[in-house]
Amino acid sequence: MKLDSRTALPDYHAFPRIVDNYAQYGQKQVLLGGDNISRLEIRLPGGYQGKEGFFEWIIEPNQEVNHRLFTQK
């Protein structure tokens, strides 16, 4: 995992890969990008580094994950 240079903790883009196994249980929504391409957004509630929030993924039509982030509530 990539470390945040200020805190020496993993940053919110680098949450543990094991969480990816639970993405199927998250809320799904289709997003239409400015390029007119539909992508799937998944949001899964949970906690990371002692904070509550959501694990998020954005998945391209070819199933490639282009965004992976933990956001705080």
Image (cartoon, rainbow, N blue to C red):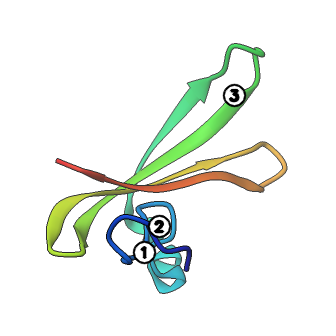
Q: Which residue lies furthest to the right in this view?
A: 62
x, y percent for residue 68: 54, 57
Q: Residue at x 47, y 81 (%)?
A: 16
x, y percent for residue 55: 38, 60
Q: Dot 1 lies on which element?
A: loop
Precedes in sequence: disc 3 or disc 1? 1
Q: Name the residue under label 1.
A: 10
Judged left or right of residue 26, residue 30 is right
- For badge 2, the amino acid type reads Ala
Within 10 Å of disc 2 (Cα), the crowding (few <14, some 14-19, many 20+) is: some
Q: Which residue is drawn at 51% across and 70% down?
A: 14
Q: Dot 3 lies on which element?
A: strand
- For badge 3, the amino acid type reads Ser
Judged left or right of residue 52, residue 29 is right
Judged left or right of residue 6, residue 15 is right
x, y percent for residue 41: 52, 43
- For badge 1, the amino acid type reads Pro
Distance from disc 3 to disc 1, alpha carbons, whole Å, reads 30 Å
Q: Nearer the viewer, mark 2 or mark 1?
A: 1
Q: Name the residue under label 2.
A: 23
Within 10 Å of disc 3 (Cα), the crowding (few <14, some 14-19, many 20+) is: some
Q: Which of marks 3 and 1 is in front?
A: 1
Q: Which residue is drawn at 74% across and 44% down?
A: 60
Q: What is the number of the mark on residue 38?
A: 3
Within 10 Å of disc 1 (Cα), the crowding (few <14, some 14-19, many 20+) is: some
Precedes in sequence: disc 2 or disc 1? 1
